[in-house]
Structure formats: structure tokens, C-alpha cells
Image (spheres, rainbow, N blue to C red):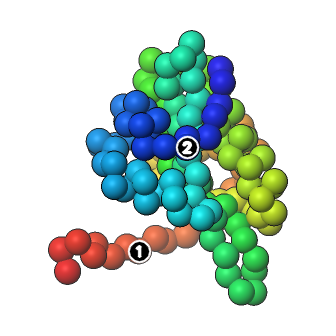
């Protein structure tokens, strides 16, 4: 397995099977061109097998932390440690960038994701409630 940082929209398009939908070129360029945004792709025999995206978040009284925004492993490559390796690679990148921590929001019934993050060294920080705003329909 080879984990590499995505650098252009073509890489994201080639790995769009790992995303929830098509990789739109304009959104891909915006993501990759934004400071603090990164996507790591795991390749097995040259084939995109998994990806993790992260976004740095900075606050005046806390410093910078990394949000693990999304993790995906192709169904045919699951249970091989790819998700754990991607999560650890993102944590290593966050550490190298000077982030004081990394976090992820996970549905409480997503046992596979919880097991992956636990195996990569995440700690349970307790339950919380998440609220969202749908700004597309407003």
C-alpha cells in the first residue's frame, strides 16, 4: 500500500469511487487550493483503495487542530488495515503541521468506523449532540 497526498483534480476524479458522489472539478480545485485542506489516497497495486480528508481549524485561544472530515475504504479492500493506516497518516500530517489535536464526528452506531478510529489511537471524549443547518434550501 502506498499513501500519497492528492495534488490535483484529476487524482480526485480517478478516486471518485471512494467519494459519496462525483468529484466536481471546480469543487476539487477549491478543496485542494484551500490552505489547511488535504486528502490522502491509499493505493494498492496502483488502484485507489481508500482516502481520508482533513481540514485544519484554527481558533485564537486554542491554536490549530485537524478535523478528520471523511474516511472511505473501497468495499473490496476493507478489513486490511487501510482505514487505520490512512487515519494514522492524517494524524502524522497534522502533527507535522503543528496541530495540537485531531478529532472526528462519528455516528454512535457506526461500529466499523469506531473500531477503525480506536485502533488508530483515538480516545472516546464522551457523547455530544450535533446540530446542522441546511443552507442550500434556505
Place of residue 113 in the rendered image (x, y in percent of width and height, measured from the top left): 55, 41
The residue lying furthest to the top in this view is: 45
Place of residue 66 in the rendered image (x, y in percent of width and height, measured from the top left): 66, 61
Q: Is residue 112 visible?
A: no
In the rendered image of this protein, does residue 64 appear above or below residue 31?
below
In the picture, the quarter occupied by the N terminus is top right
- The residue shown at (31%, 48%) is 24
In this image, 122 relative to 56: left or right? right
Q: CA distance from mark 2 to mark 1?
A: 32 Å
In this image, 59 relative to 110: left or right? right
In the rendered image of this protein, does residue 1 appear above or below residue 7?
above
| Observer-nearest of 135 and 4 | 4
Mark 1 lies on a secondary structure that is: loop
Q: Is residue 36 visible?
A: yes
Where is mark 1, residue-wise? 131
In the rendered image of this protein, does residue 115 appear above or below residue 61?
above
Report the disc number at residue 7: 2
In this image, 40 relative to 138: left or right? right
- The residue shown at (49%, 25%) is 48
In the rendered image of this protein, does residue 78 appear above or below residue 22?
above
- The residue shown at (81%, 63%) is 98
Report the disc number at residue 54: none
Residue 136 sits in which quadrant? bottom left
In the picture, the quarter occupied by the C terminus is bottom left
Amino acid at each position: 500500500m502506498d499513501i500519497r497526498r492528492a495534488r490535483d483534480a484529476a487524482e480526485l476524479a480517478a478516486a471518485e469511487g471512494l467519494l459519496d458522489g462525483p468529484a466536481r472539478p471546480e469543487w476539487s480545485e477549491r478543496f485542494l487550493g484551500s490552505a489547511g485542506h488535504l486528502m490522502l489516497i491509499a493505493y494498492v497495486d496502483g488502484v485507489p483503495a481508500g482516502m481520508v480528508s482533513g481540514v485544519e481549524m484554527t481558533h485564537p485561544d486554542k491554536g490549530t487542530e485537524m478535523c478528520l472530515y471523511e474516511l472511505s475504504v473501497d468495499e473490496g479492500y476493507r478489513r486490511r488495515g487501510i482505514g487505520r493506516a490512512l487515519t494514522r497518516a492524517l494524524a502524522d500530517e497534522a502533527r507535522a503541521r503543528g496541530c495540537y489535536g485531531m478529532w472526528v464526528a462519528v455516528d454512535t452506531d457506526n461500529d466499523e468506523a469506531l473500531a477503525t478510529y480506536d485502533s488508530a489511537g483515538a480516545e472516546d471524549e464522551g457523547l455530544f449532540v450535533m446540530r446542522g443547518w441546511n443552507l442550500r434550501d434556505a
